[in-house]
Image (tube, rainbow, N blue to C red):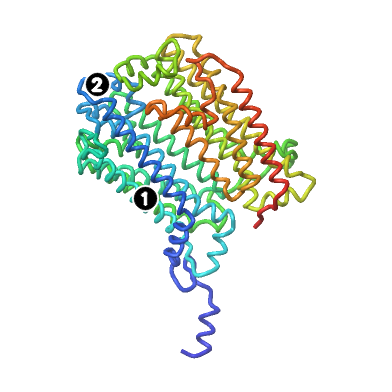
Amino acid sequence: MTSATKTADVGAPARPGTAAGGGALAGTGTLVRFALRRDRVRLPVWILALLLGTLSTANSYAELYGTPEDRANAVETMGSPAGLAMSGPRHYLDDYTSGAMLGHQMLGFTAVLVGLMSVLVITRHTRAEEETGRAELLRSTVVGRHAHLAAALSVAALANLVLSLLLALGSLLLALGLGGLGVDGVDAGGSLLYGAAHAAAGLVFAGVTAVTAQLTAHARGATGTALAVIGAAYVLRAAGDSGENGALSWLSPIGWAQRTYVYVDDDWWPLLLCLALAAGCAATGFALSTRRDVGAGIRPQKPGRPVASPALGTPLGLALRLHRGMLAGFGAGLFLMGAMYGSILGQAEDMLKDIDQLQEALERIGGTGIAEAFASMVMVVVAVVAAVYVVMAALRARAEETAGRAEPLLATGLSRGRWAGSHLAVAMGGGTLALLVAGLGFGIAGAASTGDGALAPRLVGAALAYAPALWVTVGVAAVLFGWLPRASAAAWIVPVYAFVVGYLGQILRFPGWMNNLSPFGHVPRLPAADLNWTPLLVLTLVAAGLVWLGLAGLRRRDLETK
């Protein structure tokens, strides 16, 4: 080859869809290693949390339903339409061993969490990379146009595979009597299928996110659309399982995973539907990525109004505009969650009358009846879900800072306190609003289920009582953001700890001092307990002090800019 030919080859542009020195997938392996390096903490935390949650639940089933009589009572309770909507298909009830309980009551719920993990992995390593400009920088090197999506799907698949293997191994060890307690109905084949069902559901939602990441130019939009698909899949599953023929469940990948009838029939073939849908969605994502520019989405952005709303000229108005989509999604989800729990409130006494451990937990809560005590226990779960929203909302200021969007705003006359305070105010107000709509859903459905109309306002008040605890959660996030911005993600410890201690701790009888370490542990357990204003006022003052401290730290540190 002559020197002139070499020069011509070097100067010639690469073919469309390829990278110089490689094809469309060039650099995928390097990006996979880079993604694993970035997620070296996130993914292990996700996997261990899902694993420990499953194993502790399986262990509790063996303890709570240790005799055939106990399981027969559980079958009678879970056989109602409301019970099936909360759990899964009726066929599991035909042989309701502890293993069947695990597949019936946990598989649909944990599939949602596995789907959430997959959604966050895909958006973090695809659309978020484009939004921050890192993808364009890498694409200027020897990186193919499909490398980012292929790497993200590879990481998601690896995470789901590791989780499935650990779930299979963990459930099998329980069946063999780890810790002195054997779990009946669990065998090796069923354990492998149980883990594989989770992985299959996770791959489906990873594929769905590969499509949504191409539709919009923003990571939050891609995540929100994918989460809406997960919500629709869960609703279809619940509606189908509570009906007569269950046809709607066959429209949901979560329903397909549950139709394996793990630990009952151990049917593998429904997972083929999940794999086919996951492959189809992934292929669609790759195809759509060739029809758009880097940083853009398939769906064109709507042109803005000729004149901006006056509210956008204020920090609070801008923060509301940025948070409104996430707030609406959490509000709708919490309303449905409250309504689902409220729909079984009238059956709570029959559901729990023969479960000694839960009876003891409810007696410790107090109240005049099991329904009130059960509502108090469920309200902790509702408050923790609302706390997930407030952490995400409070940390939005950190995302704006690292993305470089805060610096232009603060270069004007806008102070740091007003800018960050607007995001914190929306987090606190939005969290309170989320509690309100959750209480409304719980109260309306609970009043209809029990026939007690006076219960509705009491349940709304019980939900709102957790608002000061949410404000303290915002305060913790504010302190981390102000003083230790790189450790801001540690704010997630608050809702996770609150769930483990406040909900599971009531059943497993954790020491009281552990509950006192959580702001949610100081909230009166309404409607079972009497209202006590003192802890609520103290929590409000603590929240105010934490927010002030966090804003003071923000004023004293440098911004992290691009």
Other residues around mark 1 within 10 Å, as few (<14) / some (14–19) / many (≥20): some
Disc assigned to residue 280: 1
Place residue 491 in its image quadrant. top right
Label ID, residue 47:
none
Mark 2 or 1, which is nearer the eye? 2
Asked if labels 1 and 2 touch by Cβ distance under 8 angstroms, the answer is: no
Left or right side of 555 for 489: left
| Residue beneath the point at 63% across and 23% down | 537
Depicted 316 relative to depicted 368: above or below: below
The residue at which mark 2 appears reads as 70
View extreme (right): residue: 413
Q: Is residue 305 visible?
A: no
Using the image as rendered, state which of residue 76 and residue 501 is in the foreground.
501
Amino acid on which the number 2 mark rests in the picture: Asp
The mark that comes first in sequence, 2 or 1, is: 2
Of 397 and 284, the residue lying toward us: 397
The answer to whether any part of residue 479 appears in the image is: yes
Which residue is at 20% across, 34% downward?
Answer: 185
Q: Residue at x 74, y 38 (%)?
A: 314
Q: Is 458 rendered above or below residue 302?
A: above
**Amino acid tagged 1:** Gly
197 relative to 479 in the view: left or right = left
Mark 2 residue element: helix
